[in-house]
């Protein structure tokens, strides 16, 4: 797939007022555009103070011009960046001036797409650009930078290189069936296969951590009325986001609040209390509670520490989806005469005083699968996880087909194909369009 020959332009800074705003141009004919707008072509990679001129040689703005000749630019094409004052009217005047010179407006993500097509970035790195922009926590931002610098891609390349070596060995065995297969060859084959499986599992674990940083997890607060769900939501978020009242049924709908724990984004959902009610609106709220539970990554079942877990609450717990982890949280521990765990299960807290909240945070992270890795993690998307799982399944099938070398070789090929889809070595055009269309215009 060849890059589009069109010259593109867009405002590359956020909308609204700011100290500095930028219009970015990439493609052919940059010299002619610079001559028209600046009166000259700036020296490569030098910040040049310039007047930005309209079609009548009137000054639109004054700012810094930067020229990056191909291939030493973000897109791999000639790039001109015009950095002026960050006013909306000024930037749009400057953009319109560029468009009047035959430049077209860039599509969302088109600058980064051109960087990918010109081999400046692979697909995983290109996606990390958008992930870095969208990062909501410092940990997510650091992980996105690691992906942008190529850590994720490097891990995939190591796997692919080992697969290529294994495939070469297997193909040689297939091509020369009349030769006696040396025992050393089969041992080498098995050794490489085991090594690839181990490294693939390690990469998948790191990718899962990166997916948590990018997507976060959804936590459902469930329980009977007046056990303190709204109070716990307020305690975890650090602000009064939910109405707290002694009147049962106060929370009628699901209240959502985004929080961070150790840099991990979590989406806390305070649900309506579960009980038998004649109130139609309250019953609608409880129906939404059941829907929320089905979509959660973790369920916190709040209980009254003084009364423990009764039969009705046990029945509620039994209805939780088997594949979603849950934690019993005994609230109002400040009202207990002895600060001891209830029946040796769950965790005791006080949403009112904050007692036990730090331990609850740690337990929540553990249950959603977060592991604080000293070596760091890289950002990952759902499609990356699907590709890694697919590669793992093909590799498992290959292991079961050692006595059928043709099928074994085919499963290895499919494993490599799944891994290559992560970095974009082999990707369908429609996949690329879907990925880059989610970028900002100007990026």
Image (cartoon, helix red, strand yellow):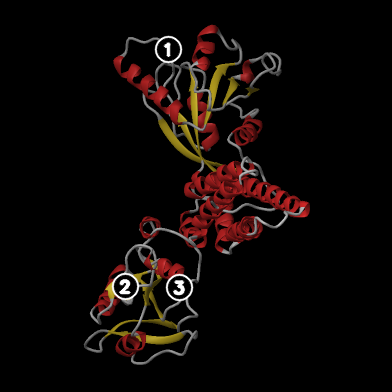
Q: Tell me if residue 34 comes above or below residue 415 in the rendering.
A: below
Q: Is residue 263 visible?
A: no
- Dots 3 and 2: beta carbons under 8 Å? no
Question: What distance separates the C-alpha of mark 1 from that of mark 3?
Answer: 61 Å
Give the labeled residue for mark 1. Answer: 275
Disc 3 secondary structure class = loop
Give the labeled residue for mark 2. Answer: 91
Count residues near mark 1 (Cα–Cα under 10 Å), then give few for <14, some for 14-19, many for 20+: some
x and y, in percent, of residue 351 in the image: 57, 26
Disc 2 secondary structure class = helix
Q: Quadrant of the C terminus?
A: bottom left
x and y, in percent, of residue 360 in the image: 62, 30
Task: Tell me the number on the disc at residue 118.
Answer: 3
Q: Earlier in the sequence, mark 1 or mark 3?
A: 3
Q: Earlier in the sequence, mark 2 or mark 1?
A: 2
Disc 1 secondary structure class = loop
Q: Tell me if residue 42 comes above or below residue 147 in the rendering.
A: below
Q: Single out the residue that lies furthest toward the top.
A: 311
């Amino acid at each position: 797939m060849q890059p589009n020959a069109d010259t593109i332009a867009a405002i590359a800074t956020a909308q609204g007022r700011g100290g500095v705003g930028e219009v970015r141009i990439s493609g052919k004919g940059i010299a002619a555009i610079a001559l028209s707008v600046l009166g000259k072509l700036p020296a490569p990679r030098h910040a040049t103070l310039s007047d930005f001129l309209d079609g009548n040689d009137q000054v639109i703005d004054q700012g810094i011009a930067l020229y990056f000749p191909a291939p030493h630019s973000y897109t791999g094409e000639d790039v001109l960046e015009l950095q002026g004052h960050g006013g909306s009217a000024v930037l749009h005047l400057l953009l319109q001036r560029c468009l009047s010179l035959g430049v077209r407006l860039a599509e969302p993500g088109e600058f980064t797409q051109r960087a990918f097509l010109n081999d400046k970035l692979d697909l995983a790195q290109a996606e990390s650009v958008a992930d870095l922009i969208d990062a909501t926590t410092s940990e997510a931002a650091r992980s996105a930078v690691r992906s942008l610098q190529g850590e994720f891609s490097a891990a995939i390349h190591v796997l692919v290189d080992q697969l290529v070596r294994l495939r070469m060995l297997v193909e040689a065995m297939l091509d020369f069936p009349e030769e006696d297969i040396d025992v050393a060859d089969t041992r080498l084959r098995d050794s490489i296969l085991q090594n690839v499986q181990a490294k693939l599992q390690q990469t998948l674990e790191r990718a899962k951590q990166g997916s948590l940083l990018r997507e976060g997890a959804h936590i459902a607060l469930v329980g009977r009325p007046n056990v303190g769900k709204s109070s716990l939501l307020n305690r975890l978020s650090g602000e009064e986001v939910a109405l707290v009242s002694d009147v049962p049924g106060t929370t009628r709908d699901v209240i959502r609040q985004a929080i961070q724990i150790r840099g991990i984004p979590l989406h806390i959902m305070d649900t309506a209390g579960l009980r038998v009610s004649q109130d139609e609106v309250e019953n609608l709220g409880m129906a939404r509670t059941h829907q929320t539970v089905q979509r959660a990554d973790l369920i916190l079942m709040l209980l009254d520490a003084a009364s423990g877990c009764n039969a009705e609450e046990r029945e509620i717990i039994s209805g939780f989806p088997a594949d979603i982890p849950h934690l019993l949280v005994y609230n109002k521990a400040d009202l207990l005469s002895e600060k001891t765990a209830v029946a040796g299960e769950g965790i005791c807290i006080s949403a009112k005083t904050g007692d036990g909240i730090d331990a609850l945070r740690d337990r929540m992270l553990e249950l959603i699968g977060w592991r604080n890795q000293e070596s760091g993690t890289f950002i990952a998307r759902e499609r990356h996880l699907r590709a890694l799982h697919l590669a793992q399944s093909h590799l498992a099938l290959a292991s079961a087909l050692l006595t059928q070398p043709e099928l074994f070789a085919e499963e290895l090929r499919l494993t490599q194909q799944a891994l290559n889809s992560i970095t974009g070595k082999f990707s369908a055009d429609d996949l690329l369009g879907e990925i880059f269309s989610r970028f900002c215009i100007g990026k």
